């Protein structure tokens, strides 16, 4: 009964329009007062403080800063130009360029919203100029942005690793193959739609000399993703230290190499980064006492028993978990779901023998799909604003691309090696 009451209270705070952090705090504090009395309220403050002092979480503001600096410093334009050089001339070429560009940018920002808001501006403008409809351009930009937090680095993986006490490096490696599969799946859907919709082709080959200039101009930006991964996986730097280096590199690149980053833009970017970081960290802080309440009241155990009464088969439970996460993604912001749902679902995954690294990829991939599902798909709002089209128009184009992403989700869910093979091969402990 108490389990249902806690979950219902969270739902009511969301429906009432209370911010996620405030809702979690109210439910946690209220439950503590009702069940343990005011004497243990000190735990609320202790848990909230402890949740924000984890060293890996320092990576979050620096990856956010790196992505923001790349958006205002001219890096995203160079990435788009190289992607256009690779696949721009086939039918539906700029749609494929959109996906390739997002896959490259994913190795720098770790944020789907940064991808949609930064690279999306360039992609949508170029696609509309080439003859694509605004709503189709917006749709492709939204779905391709979901790759951002899967291919490393990844802000959600940093948060998951901190909560689950799992190596962030292992999670980064685990996202590489699923991220590539997402890109291939979206490009396959684009290829089918290109024939059906008779999508335009881009201009012909620009010539060897202009192509080489484009590649050389973008070379420093393209070198950043592998550099981040190399320093992490060779032990030269932790993910947090690599995030600092990425932010510094993005500043130097935009300020001194491309010379498009003005100091006024830099200070504005710092302010935006601080605001975005504060939003994330406040949710993390308020989720910690909420998680303590869930565990103290044995809510995960109650949910585990409920799922086990439906089925003892791991594949059925995994399917149910995916369905629940996809539904939650339609109504809640991704990081909020991650923080709320992890302490509930982690014991369920442990009970059926799912490796925590594998579960991290499943969970984050689900939440990225949620960013492009109405009514609260954040990426949909971002791209509809850029393209100046109603969200309903963008949603009408989504079906084949959502189908492609869900197929990849099923592959990742039921073929654990897709996410566990690479970290295991490179020496990170993974349950077989």
Image (cartoon, rainbow, N blue to C red):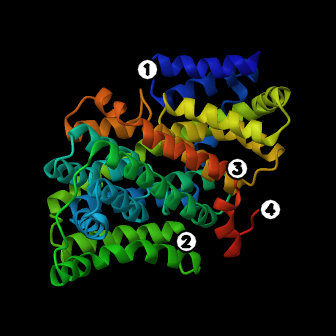
N-terminal label among 3 and 4: 3
Q: Give me the disc on residue 432.
A: 4
Q: Residue 70 appears at what percent x and percent y?
A: 28, 63
N-terminal label among 4 and 1: 1
Residue marked by disc 1: 17
Residue marked by disc 3: 414
Distance of label 3 from label 4 (alpha carbons): 13 Å
Q: Quadrant of residue 2?
A: top right
The quadrant in which the C terminus is found is bottom right
Q: Residue 360 appears at what percent x and percent y?
A: 63, 51
| Residue 68 located left or right of residue 233 | left
N-terminal label among 1 and 3: 1
Distance of label 1 from label 3 (alpha carbons): 36 Å
Of the residues tagged 3 and 2, which is closer to the observer? 3
Q: Is residue 42 above or below residue 215?
A: above
Q: Residue at x 79, y 61 (%)?
A: 431
Distance of label 2 from label 4 (alpha carbons): 26 Å
Residue marked by disc 2: 238
């Amino acid at each position: 009964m108490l389990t249902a009451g806690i979950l219902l209270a969270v739902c009511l705070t969301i429906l009432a329009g209370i911010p996620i952090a405030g809702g979690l705090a109210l439910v946690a504090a209220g439950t503590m007062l009702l069940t343990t009395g005011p004497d243990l309220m000190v735990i609320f403050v202790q848990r909230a403080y402890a949740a924000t002092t984890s060293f890996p979480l320092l990576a979050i503001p620096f990856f956010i800063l790196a992505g923001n600096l790349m958006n205002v410093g001219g890096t995203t334009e160079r990435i788009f130009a190289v992607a256009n050089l690779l696949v721009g001339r086939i039918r539906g070429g700029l749609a494929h360029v959109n996906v390739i560009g997002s896959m490259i940018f994913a190795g720098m920002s770790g944020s789907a919203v940064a991808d949609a808001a930064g690279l999306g501006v360039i992609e949508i403008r170029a696609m509309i100029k080439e003859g694509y409809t605004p709503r189709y351009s917006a749709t492709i930009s939204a779905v391709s942005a979901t790759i951002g937090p899967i291919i490393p680095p990844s802000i959600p993986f940093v948060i998951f690793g901190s909560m689950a006490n799992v190596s962030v490096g292992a999670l980064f490696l685990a996202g590489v193959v699923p991220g590539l599969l997402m890109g291939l799946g979206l490009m396959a859907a684009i290829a089918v739609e290109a024939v059906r919709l008779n999508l335009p082709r881009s201009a012909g080959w620009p010539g060897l000399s202009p192509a080489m200039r484009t590649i050389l101009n973008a070379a420093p930006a393209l070198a950043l993703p592998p550099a981040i991964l190399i320093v992490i996986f060779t032990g030269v730097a932790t993910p947090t230290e690599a995030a600092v280096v990425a932010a510094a590199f993005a500043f130097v690149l935009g300020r001194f190499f491309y010379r498009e980053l003005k100091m006024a833009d830099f200070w504005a970017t710092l302010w935006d980064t601080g605001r975005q970081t504060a939003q994330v960290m406040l949710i993390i802080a308020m989720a910690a006492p909420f998680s303590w309440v869930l565990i103290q009241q044995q809510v995960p155990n109650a949910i585990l028993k409920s799922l086990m009464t439906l089925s003892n088969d791991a594949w059925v439970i995994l399917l149910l978990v995916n369905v629940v996460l996809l539904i939650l993604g339609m109504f809640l912001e991704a990081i909020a779901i991650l923080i709320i749902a992890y302490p509930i679902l982690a014991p369920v995954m442990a009970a059926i023998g799912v490796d925590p690294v594998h579960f991290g990829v499943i969970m984050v991939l689900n939440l990225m799909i949620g960013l492009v599902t109405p009514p609260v798909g954040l990426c949909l709002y971002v791209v509809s604003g850029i393209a100046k089209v109603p969200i309903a128009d963008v949603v009408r184009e989504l079906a084949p691309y959502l189908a492609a992403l869900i197929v990849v989700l099923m592959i990742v869910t039921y073929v654990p090696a897709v996410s566990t093979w690479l970290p295991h091969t490179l020496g990170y402990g993974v349950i077989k």
